[in-house]
Image: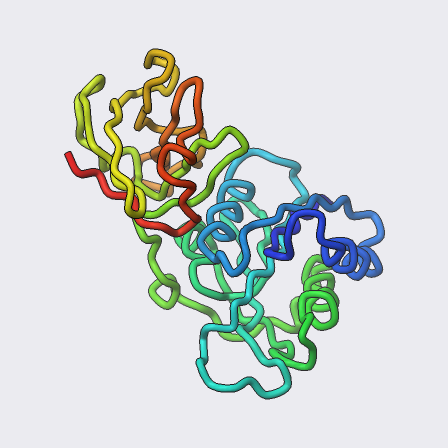
């Protein structure tokens, strides 16, 4: 089994090793890959859950995710309680296990055969993804479904906000949650884009490299996944500065900042 561990522990944080050890106690043959998202960013978590689970990969694979900002209740916490654990079985057979917080399930909710609450303690440790959740996740991945409880309906999961920074890659390209099929602009048209408080001119392109060096492109990017039945395949718009860094051009915005097409 291949397990993608997505969490907001921080790049290089030993927490990844601690959680991996607990998972492999019960799943000794599993191969685990680790992906760090920004602190408390349920949007980035949900984006990468979908990108990695809905695209081609090993047949026997699962996502184990943890991004739990504990924002479901503003009051003081008892016994470190936080958002609860869920299990989603996707239409392609991929299993997704992790905390239901913010947008973590938003990108996959229409691709899931079912989403269920996992009946496991929501408290008991500050580090639930190491101390509480791995045993439950391992049981499910070993086909023991006795912990599964009530079903969650898609309407109980927040919709994707269609105007945000989803990710900044290593080249400074800004991946957005703006669906490409909703942008109705002629190729090579000059547009203005606002990210956070910064506005820049850009060229709408149907392919990022079809712009000259030093030009900011607003184009369908490399992220997306196959369609839900009856819909178009999902592609997300991206801001790409050929020969430069779009993230720096826009003042180094954070994930979840608003992106607006002004013209």
Q: Is residue 113 left or right of residue 128?
A: left
Q: Is residue 82 above or below residue 160?
A: below
Please name the residue shown 26% across and 40% down the image. Answer: 194
Please name the residue shown 34% across and 34% down the image. Answer: 237
* Picture coordinates of residue 230, whole percent (x, y): 30, 40
Q: Is residue 24 left or right of residue 123?
A: right
The chosen color scheme is rainbow
**82 or 24, nearer to the observer:** 82
- Residue 39 visible here: yes
Please name the residue shown 56% across and 50% down the image. Answer: 37
Q: Is residue 137 above or below residue 45?
A: below
**44 or 132, nearer to the observer:** 44
**53 or 166, nearer to the observer:** 166
Q: Quadrant of the C terminus?
A: top left
Q: Quadrant of the N terminus?
A: top right
- Residue 185's quadrant in the figure? top left
- Residue 23's quadrant in the figure? bottom right
Count every numbered label the image shows and give the total: 0
* Picture coordinates of residue 80, whole percent (x, y): 62, 81
- Residue 163 visible here: no
Q: Is residue 77 above or below residue 237?
A: below
**173 or 161, nearer to the observer:** 173
* Picture coordinates of residue 214, whole percent (x, y): 36, 17
- Residue 179's quadrant in the figure? top left
* Picture coordinates of residue 257, whole percent (x, y): 36, 50
Please name the residue shown 41% across and 36% down the image. Answer: 174
Residue furthest left as drawn = 263
């Amino acid at each position: 089994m291949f397990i993608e561990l997505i969490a907001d522990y921080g790049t290089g944080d030993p927490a990844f090793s601690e959680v991996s050890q607990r998972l492999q106690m019960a799943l000794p043959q599993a191969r685990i890959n680790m992906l760090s998202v920004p602190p408390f960013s349920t949007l980035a978590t949900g984006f990468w859950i979908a990108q990695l689970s809905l695209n081609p990969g090993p047949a026997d694979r699962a996502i184990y995710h943890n991004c739990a900002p504990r924002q479901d209740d503003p009051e003081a916490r008892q016994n470190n309680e936080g958002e609860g654990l869920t299990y989603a079985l996707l239409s392609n057979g991929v299993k997704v296990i992790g905390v239901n917080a913010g947008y973590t399930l938003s990108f996959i909710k229409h691709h899931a055969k079912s989403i269920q609450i996992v009946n496991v303690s929501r408290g008991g440790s500050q580090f639930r993804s190491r101390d509480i959740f791995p045993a439950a996740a391992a049981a499910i991945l070993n086909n023991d479904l006795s912990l599964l409880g009530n079903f969650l309906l898609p309407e109980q999961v927040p919709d994707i906000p269609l105007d945000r920074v989803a990710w900044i890659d290593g080249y400074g390209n800004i991946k957005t949650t703006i669906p490409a099929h909703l942008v109705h602009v002629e190729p090579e048209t000059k547009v203005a884009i606002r990210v956070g408080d910064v506005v820049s001119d850009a060229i709408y392109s149907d392919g990022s490299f079809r712009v000259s060096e030093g030009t900011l492109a607003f184009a369908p990017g490399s992220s997306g996944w196959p369609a839900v039945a009856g819909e178009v395949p999902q592609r997300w718009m991206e801001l790409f500065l050929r020969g430069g860094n779009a993230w720096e051009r826009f003042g180094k915005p954070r994930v979840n900042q608003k992106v607006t097409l002004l013209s």
